[in-house]
Amino acid sequence: MGMMKIQSKCGEVSSDRVGVIPPPESFRVWLAGSLVRLGLKAGGYGPELGLGKNTLGHFLAGPDRDLRLGTAAMISNDLMARAQEAGTALDPIPSAVSGGDDA
């Protein structure tokens, strides 16, 4: 199968940059690091994506919190597109297949 372009609110990103969504604990660590690298705050970034202002903050703060798969995919695709546009490297999304280790 050929490479696809995936549309995000910040532009397009190549499908080879889209990772497997890991368990919430691993995604939480990746999300926190990605927000820091891109200089984004959870309370400001969430509403840019149509989320409540506390949605990402609650997810990041609570190990008992979870995100829907569609929300996690939207966030990861958008952050990767922003990083690509900014010329910033993000850590790979940990792979659920590899037990949460980097893909």
Image: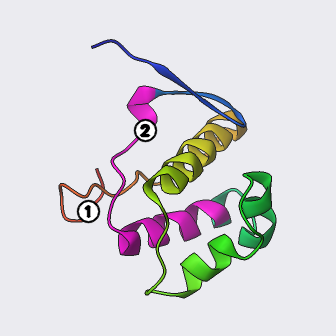
Q: Which residue is mark 1?
A: 101
Instruction: Indicate which label's residue lies in the foreground, 2 or 1.
Output: 2
Which quarter of the figure has residue 1? Answer: top left
Q: Which residues are drawn in magenta?
A: 15-35
Camera-nearest residue between 80 and 90:
80
Instruction: Give neighbour class at mark 1: few <14, some 14-19, many 20+ (Cα, 10 Å).
Output: few
Q: Residue at x 49, y 81 (%)?
A: 65
Disc 2 is placed on an element classified as: loop
Residue 74, position as x, y percentages in the image: 56, 47
Q: Which residue is mark 2?
A: 18
Q: CA distance from mark 2 to mark 1?
A: 16 Å
Side (left or right) of 56 relative to 18: right
Work out whether residue 39 can be spotted.
no
Work out whether residue 92 can be spotted.
yes
Q: Residue at x 71, y 37 (%)?
A: 9
Marks 2 and 1 close (CB-CB < 8 Å): no
